[in-house]
Image (tube, rainbow, N blue to C red):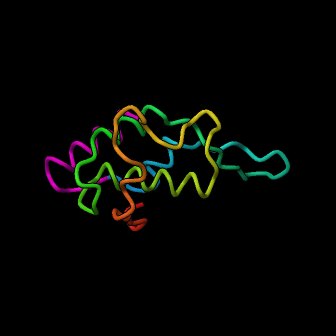
Amino acid sequence: MDGVLMLIDFEKRTGRSYLGRLSIESVVSERVPAEDWENAYDIVPVAATELRRKLLAMTDSGGSDDPAARCIILIDKLRDEYGAPESEPRHPDITSGKPWPILASAPFSDDAS
């Protein structure tokens, strides 16, 4: 989580991104060996409530130039693909007063994986 937040901060300061799908996926999911298959695994979600809360706090415009927004969108896409932990609320931080979802206009490119 700290690495992702550091990379988001780095992009905000420099305008260069080094954060891709695999970086985010490795924080919000884990690979569990499949029981019946050799050299195969299942991808299962891992709670990332604190990361999502911190990313929401870091959002600016919520547009495509907002790295924190792009990261939250990717997490939501991964949740759609692999499921979400039951313990993780849909809104990252309801007490923040920020509406959800605010980030619909910030696409995340899978090209950087």
| Residue with the most extreme right position | 36
* Residue closest to the eye, 2 or 78: 78
Identify the magenta region: 1-18
For the N terminus, the quadrant is: top left
Q: Is residue 10 covered in magenta?
A: yes
Name the spot of residue 110 as percent of width and height, x first: 43, 65
Q: Residue at x 14, y 51 (%)?
A: 14
* Residue closest to the eye, 95 or 54: 95
* Residue closest to the eye, 76 or 95: 95
Name the spot of residue 49 as percent of width and height, x first: 48, 34
Q: Main secondary structure of the magenta part?
A: helix
Which of the 4 quarters of the picture holds residue 97? top left
For the C terminus, the quadrant is: bottom left
61 lies left or right of 88: left
45 lies left or right of 75: right
Q: Residue at x 37, y 65 (%)?
A: 107
In the picture shown, does residue 60 fall above or below 96? Answer: below
